[in-house]
Image (cartoon, rainbow, N blue to C red):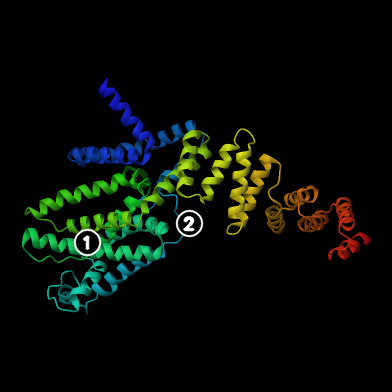
């Protein structure tokens, strides 16, 4: 009985703490894969490359029949022509990651224009720019901690690193911003180099000389593990290994980064025990650990929890299933950030899904009011969505602004209806009613509804004979 109670307590705990449950599942997956990695390394991978493509099309057809999505839509989501591992995060395309793009460009330029230049001797690089320099002095010792991050030993070394930098760097930068990203990239790169050198000195009693961006990229992966722990990464698998088309196999990014960490730790321990390896495993470990620690100290995990639950809530609203789970997730978001407009809007949709509710009305109203200044077109779209469900206006000043947005984008019918609500309502303040009544007459004119326009012009002149716009209304009535 005690064991059963313990199981129930554990289940109840993880229901109350979904993040811990999510992370625990990832850790268990990492442990299982790492434990059976020898089996997975051989024939299983070979079979995966053969079997998965063969069953792809039947799988697409089956999923299309089940989900109702079009076959081409499913293929588009799961096929890529680019044979590079990529994040599948929702932030994709929202902001251009200029720092990541610049770092990739700088690394490539340095390798091909500097390191591959016959005029540049290997001794210049080895004696001064790798970390630690082979000929250390007061100026090259601190400088090399940075320069070594931008040097690479071969084409494969360069392009392998750039692939990983692009995969994780773009998503991290979009979330934390360019300046913090650059500072953390350089900081974790320097810490990675120091870790590598220290471990070689302590355990091997020799001076380490490292170059490459992998330590800094591992630092970004550590940040990614904290800030984007919920997202997935897609691995490209060539169809039958011969076509320039790849199936995207998706896996939780926390599992992938955890596996990289475990492999580096295993190989790093072997390396410190005398095993030979050209890979700077301890630079990777130093970078990854420092990245995770710094991200935790900067509380990036809070943003990750908010984003994860926002995506869960939005997805549940879109699919129309698991609505209770969706509402719970959106409430978690609002608890963490009461100003999250998307969460407020999606709870409004949930509350209005089956019937009109006062809570749904208030939440729609709040979302429109919050986005009117920064995203006026979106605010107008949400107003239209709201009005179609509730058939009532919002506060007068806000309604008048929405009407102006609709009018300017040519949606005269909805603009006229929004203005008409203001003109008819007894609660509309006189100054707004004056403008609304005149504007609705103009809208009717623009729509070619002469009789309706004349009626509103007459009402305007009768209600506001002293208005500065009354002269225009009388002139229009005289034509």
In the rendering, which numbered label is found on residue 1?
Answer: none
Tell me residue 194's x, y (percent).
Answer: 18, 64
Q: Is 229 positioned to the left or the right of 455 in the image? A: left
Q: Which callout, 1 or 2, points to the residue nearer the camera?
A: 1
| First of labels 1, 2 by sequence position | 2
Q: How crowded is mark 1: few (under 14 residues within 10 Å), some or many (20 or more)?
A: many
> In this figure, which residue is indicated by the disc labeled 1?
192
Q: Is 327 positioned to the left or the right of 471 in the image? A: left
| Along the viewing direction, whichever of 371 and 260 lies nearer the viewer | 371
| Along the viewing direction, whichever of 441 and 98 lies nearer the viewer | 441
> In this figure, which residue is indicated by the disc labeled 2?
94
| Above-or-below relation of 124 to 301 | below
- Residue at x 17%, y 40% (from the top left corner): 38
| Above-or-below relation of 349 to 110 | above
Tell me residue 200's x, y (percent).
Answer: 11, 61
Quadrant for the N terminus in the image: top left
* Rendered image quadrant of residue 465: bottom right
Q: Is 389 positioned to the left or the right of 15 in the image? A: right
Q: How crowded is mark 2: few (under 14 residues within 10 Å), some or many (20 or more)?
A: few
Residue 213 visible in rendering: no
Looking at the rendered structure, the secondary structure element under dot 2 is loop
- Residue at x 85%, y 63% (from the top left corner): 467
């Amino acid at each position: 009985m005690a064991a059963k109670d313990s199981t129930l307590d554990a289940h109840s705990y993880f229901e109350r703490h979904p993040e811990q449950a999510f992370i625990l599942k990832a850790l268990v997956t990492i442990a299982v894969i790492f434990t059976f990695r020898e089996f997975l390394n051989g024939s299983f991978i070979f079979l995966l490359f053969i079997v998965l493509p063969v069953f792809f099309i039947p799988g697409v057809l089956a999923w299309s029949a089940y989900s109702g999505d079009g076959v081409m839509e499913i293929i588009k989501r799961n096929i890529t022509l680019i044979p590079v591992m990529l994040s599948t995060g929702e932030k994709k395309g929202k902001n251009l990651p200029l720092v990541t793009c610049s770092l990739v460009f700088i690394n490539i330029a340095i390798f091909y224009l500097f390191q591959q230049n016959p005029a540049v001797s290997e001794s210049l690089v080895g004696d001064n720019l790798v970390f630690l320099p082979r000929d250390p002095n007061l100026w090259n010792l601190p400088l090399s901690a940075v320069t070594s991050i931008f040097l690479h030993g071969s084409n494969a070394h360069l392009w392998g690193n750039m692939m990983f930098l692009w995969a994780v760097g773009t998503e991290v930068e979009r979330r934390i911003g360019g300046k913090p990203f650059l500072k953390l990239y350089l900081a974790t790169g320097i810490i990675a180099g120091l870790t590598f050198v220290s471990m070689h000195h302590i355990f091997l009693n020799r001076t380490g000389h490292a170059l490459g961006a992998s330590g800094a990229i591992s630092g970004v992966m550590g940040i990614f593990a904290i800030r984007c722990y919920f997202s997935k990464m897609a691995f490209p698998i060539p169809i039958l290994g011969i076509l320039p088309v790849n199936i995207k196999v998706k896996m939780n990014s926390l599992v992938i980064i955890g596996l990289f960490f475990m492999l580096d730790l295993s190989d790093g321990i072997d390396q410190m025990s005398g095993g030979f390896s050209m890979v700077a495993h301890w630079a990777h470990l130093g970078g990854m650990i420092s990245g995770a620690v710094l991200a935790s100290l900067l509380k990036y995990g809070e943003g990750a929890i908010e984003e994860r639950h926002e995506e869960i809530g939005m997805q549940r609203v879109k699919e129309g299933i698991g609505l209770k789970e969706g509402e719970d997730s959106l409430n978690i978001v609002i608890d963490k950030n009461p100003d999250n407009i998307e969460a407020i809007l999606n709870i409004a949709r949930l509350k209005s899904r089956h019937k009109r509710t006062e809570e749904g009305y208030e939440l729609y109203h709040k979302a429109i009011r919050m986005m009117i200044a920064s995203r006026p077109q979106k605010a107008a779209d949400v107003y239209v969505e709201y009005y179609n469900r509730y058939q009532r206006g919002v506060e007068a000043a806000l309604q008048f602004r929405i009407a102006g947005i609709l009018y300017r984008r040519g949606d005269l019918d909805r603009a006229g209806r929004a203005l008409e609500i203001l003109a008819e309502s007894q609660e509309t303040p006189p100054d707004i009613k004056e403008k609304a009544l005149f504007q609705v007459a103009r809208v009717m004119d623009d729509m070619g509804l002469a009789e309706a326009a004349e009626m509103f012009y007459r009402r305007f002149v009768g209600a506001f004979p002293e208005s500065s716009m009354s002269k225009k209304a009388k002139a229009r009535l005289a034509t």
